[in-house]
């Protein structure tokens, strides 16, 4: 495997909810719960799971938009939470985000060129002419033309606005791009264009992606490896083809069963998994309340993410027996 660009070790992020009228005790919600993960240089790591499972919280922690409750994230071997102000600014130049909503993530009072140029100004990269040249080149690279330079976000379509967001993320030539549901707000016909653009840009710029989505078809199209997240924990991690052809964890099987398909045998085999993700269990596996394969050990002991095969991991007591 190539060297790891990002290494996450035992990361926790907990939120405290205030007490209510009927409940005087505060609740602690672990949005990210003991996550250990590596993102290798040059790969696209897909992160998939239901809404509210902690995907975006993990992204914000990697981007240092939030601080963890405990745990570490290393960038090229350096703990990013120990950076001083100068080092943190340099790190953020190397890690950029593409947001879900291509409209609210753009400043409505700035033109397309100004939005793309702003990171160069903040990081003091180049002079005025060099910045203008970089913006013009990037706009062409992402499929926008010179005539659109001085237009404002409301004058663009949704797909065009997302192209502006992609250009803004690329203008500092980062090493890692975190794409948080970058096509979920777009029409299906436009989604394919943006996904293919992202794949082309990865090759052209030598990028590494953390690609977050709840859409398994999108994740399959984009990813080299896939991490499946449930209630703040990684429950399965493997290459994209292995996840889709031979899913190990019951939750992964449930996600795949939700995809449209013509295989009634597989649909019937896992149709017993029902319900919605709820609060974490005090003991045992967090998926036990929804799992049709539940055994006694599932209520007593929490499974750990263990290596099953080369570069394949699963957190389930029943791996290989179901």
Image (cartoon, grey):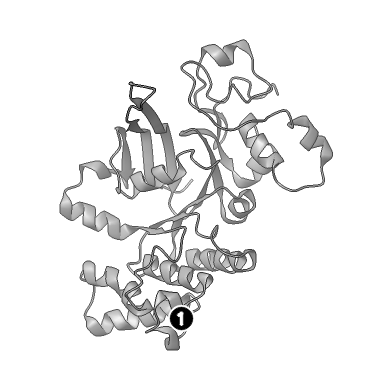
Q: Quadrant of residue 95?
A: bottom left
Q: Quadrant of the C terminus?
A: top right
Category of crowding for the residue at label 1, using alpha-carbon neighbours closer than 10 angstroms: few (below 14), some (14–19), many (at least 20)? few
Q: Residue at x 50, y 59 (%)?
A: 182
Q: Quadrant of residue 89?
A: bottom left
Q: Position of residue 121 (x, y in %)?
A: 23, 72
Which residue of the protein is positioned furthest toward the front in this rendering?
21
Numbered disc 1: secondary structure: helix
Is residue 175 left or right of 52 when viewed as pictured? left
Q: Is residue 321 above or below residue 256?
A: above
- Number of residue marks: 1
Q: Residue at x 52, y 43 (%)?
A: 51
Is residue 277 left or right of 171 when viewed as pictured? right
Q: Position of residue 120 (x, y in %)?
A: 27, 71
Q: Which residue is mark 1?
A: 140
The answer to which of 19 and 126 lies nearer the viewer is: 19
Q: Is residue 264 above or below residue 287?
A: below
Q: Position of residue 224 (x, y in %)?
A: 56, 50
Q: Residue at x 42, y 33 (%)?
A: 35
The answer to which of 17 and 263 lies nearer the viewer is: 17
Q: Position of residue 49 (x, y in %)?
A: 55, 41
Q: Is residue 85 above or below residue 319?
A: below
Is residue 250 left or right of 234 when viewed as pictured? right
């Amino acid at each position: 495997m190539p060297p790891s660009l990002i290494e996450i070790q035992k990361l926790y992020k907990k939120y405290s909810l205030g007490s209510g009228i009927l409940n005087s005790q505060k609740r602690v919600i672990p949005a990210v719960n003991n996550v250990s993960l590596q993102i290798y240089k040059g790969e696209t790591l897909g992160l998939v799971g239901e809404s509210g499972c902690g995907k975006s919280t993990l992204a914000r922690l990697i981007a240092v938009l939030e601080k963890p409750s405990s745990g570490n994230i290393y960038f090229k071997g350096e703990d990013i939470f120990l950076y001083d102000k100068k080092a943190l600014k340099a790190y953020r130049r190397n890690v950029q985000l593409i947001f879900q909503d291509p409209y609210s993530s753009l400043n409505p009072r700035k033109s397309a060129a100004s939005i793309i140029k702003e990171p160069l100004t903040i990081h003091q990269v180049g002079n005025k002419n060099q910045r203008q040249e970089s913006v013009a080149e990037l706009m062409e690279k992402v499929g926008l033309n010179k005539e659109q330079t001085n237009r404002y976000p409301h004058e663009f379509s949704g797909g065009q606005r997302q192209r502006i967001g992609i250009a803004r993320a690329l203008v500092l030539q980062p090493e890692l791009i975190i794409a948080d549901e970058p096509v979920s707000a777009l029409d299906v016909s436009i989604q394919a264009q943006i996904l293919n653009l992202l794949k082309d840009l990865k090759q052209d710029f030598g990028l590494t992606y953390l690609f977050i989505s709840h859409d398994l078809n999108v994740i399959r199209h984009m990813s080299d490896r896939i991490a499946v997240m449930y209630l703040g924990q990684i429950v399965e991690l493997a290459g994209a083809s292995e996840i889709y052809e031979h899913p190990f964890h019951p939750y992964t099987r449930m996600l795949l069963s939700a995809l449209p398909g013509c295989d009634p045998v597989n649909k019937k085999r896992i149709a017993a998994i029902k319900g919605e993700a709820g609060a974490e269990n005090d003991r045992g596996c967090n998926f036990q309340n929804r799992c049709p394969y539940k055994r006694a050990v599932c209520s007593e002991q929490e499974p750990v993410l263990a290596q099953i095969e080369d570069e394949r991991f699963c957190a389930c007591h029943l791996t290989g027996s179901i």
